[in-house]
Amino acid sequence: MKKLLFIVALLISFARAGEWWSDPIRGLEEAKKEHKPVMFYFHSEHCPYCLQMETFVFGDERVSKYMDRFVVISLDTYSQTGMVWAKHFNVFGTPTFVFYDPDRNSVLGVAFGSKTKEDFINLLLKVCEKSNIKKC
């Protein structure tokens, strides 16, 4: 059953609009090039709340529309890269969302835990307001 849910989440992730990055350096370069803020998404394979976000929130068309304003860097906290970046941002659990302005080298906000579609959209809008980045 877990494998089936993982496959469903994976398929939904491919259906999302916009490219997600697993390489933080390349993702940050893309964000700078496009003058977009970054959303680091810290997750783990065994996190039921991450699966909930991936299945029911990220796959929503309205949510995807707002997420397209960000360069999304998706990091598994059990991977070597994920551990390094989680430590850098003091991530203590999953799912955690770190919003970052690469042009100013500053964290715009951090959110922990599963969200509803509406709450996640509101979070994205608040981060955009705070960022003052034109593309957001």
Image (cartoon, rainbow, N blue to C red):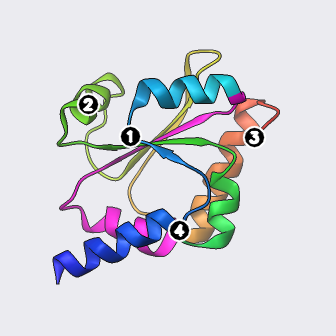
The residue mark sitting in front, 2 or 3, is 2
Give the distance between the C-alpha atoms of the residues marked 4 and 2, in whole angstroms. Answer: 25 Å
Residue bearing mark 4: 15
Residues at marks 2 and 3 touching, judged by CB atoms closer than 8 Å: no
Q: Which one is earlier in the sequence, the residue at label 3 or at label 4? A: 4
Dot 3 falls on a residue whose secondary structure is loop
Q: Which mark is residue 22?
A: 1
- The 10 Å Cα crowd at callout 1, few under 14, some 14 to 19, many 20 or more, is some
Q: Which one is earlier in the sequence, the residue at label 1 or at label 2? A: 1
Part of the protein shown in magenta: 34-58
- Quarter of the figure with residue 5: bottom left
Dot 4 falls on a residue whose secondary structure is helix
Give the distance between the C-alpha atoms of the residues marked 3 and 4, in whole angstroms. Answer: 22 Å
- Which amino acid, by three-letter code, is at mark 2? Thr
Left or right, 27 with reference to 89 = right
The residue mark sitting in front, 3 or 4, is 4
Q: Which one is earlier in the sequence, the residue at label 4 or at label 2? A: 4
Q: Which one is earlier in the sequence, the residue at label 1 or at label 4? A: 4
Report the residue at 50% width, 31% height from top.
Answer: 27
Image: 58 above or below 29:
below
